[in-house]
Amino acid sequence: MARIAILTCSNCTQDSNCASVVCLADMRKRRGFFQAYPQDEPLDLIGIINCAGCPTLAAPEKILKRVRAVAEFHLDALHLSFCMVTLCPFIKSYTALIKREFPGINIVMGTHQPADRDRFMQGVKELLCQTLAAPQTMNDLIRGTLKIPQE
């Protein structure tokens, strides 16, 4: 049995109301970056944590504290969500830090893969900036109903 956790982007989960629905669905269905696990091997989701946000002086310590919270439960793999891998300008420093502090944990660079990476990035930007009159959430982006202004 593989014991896994998912590290998500704080901006996406906190500011855009993402509930990790697609990440969890792909985990259950063994799609995306979860297809590497054998179908007959159970996956044990230890927890979902989010990053410390962009950027803070305490981000490295905060991210280690959050990873430690799941690592203490015999974690095999830490999946960095698609939003972390796609959007985070600090991803390289975070992964280097996690690898150094927790060398026994396999870091997987992704959960799911949206069909259109550029549209996802533009959609998240719109959600975080909310330039439209009607507020939208990550659910709108997932369902394909997000209205993205043309630049």
Image (cartoon, helix red, strand yellow):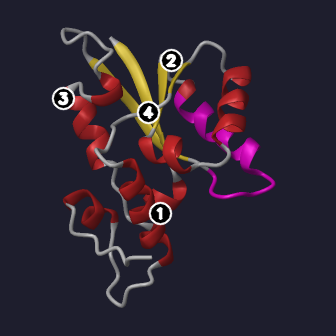
N-terminal of the pair, mark 2 or mark 4, is: 2
- Badge nearest the viewer, 4 or 3: 4
Residue labelled with disc 2: 74
N-terminal of the pair, mark 3 or mark 1, is: 1
Q: Position of residue 121 (x, y in %)?
A: 45, 57
Q: Position of residue 39 (x, y in %)?
A: 20, 12
| Magenta-colored span | 52-70
Residue labelled with disc 4: 110
Give the residue type that dot 4 points to.
Answer: Gly
Q: Is residue 122 magenta?
A: no
N-terminal of the pair, mark 4 or mark 1, is: 1
Q: Are marks 4 and 1 in contact (CB under 8 Å)?
A: no
Give the residue type that dot 1 points to.
Answer: Gln
Residue labelled with disc 1: 14
Q: Residue at x 45, y 84 (%)?
A: 131
Q: Find numbered disc 4 in the image and state the secondary structure of the residue it sits on.
A: loop
Q: Position of residue 127 (x, y in %)?
A: 42, 71
Identify the main secondary structure in magenta: helix
Q: Which mark is residue 29?
A: 3
Question: In this picture, is 69 found above or below 51?
Answer: above
N-terminal of the pair, mark 4 or mark 3, is: 3
Q: Residue at x 59, y 48 (%)?
A: 88
Give the residue type that dot 2 points to.
Answer: His
Question: In this picture, is 33 found above or below 136?
Answer: above
- For disc 1, the neighbor class at 10 Å (few under 14, some 14 to 19, many from 20) is few
Q: Residue at x 33, y 37 (%)?
A: 112
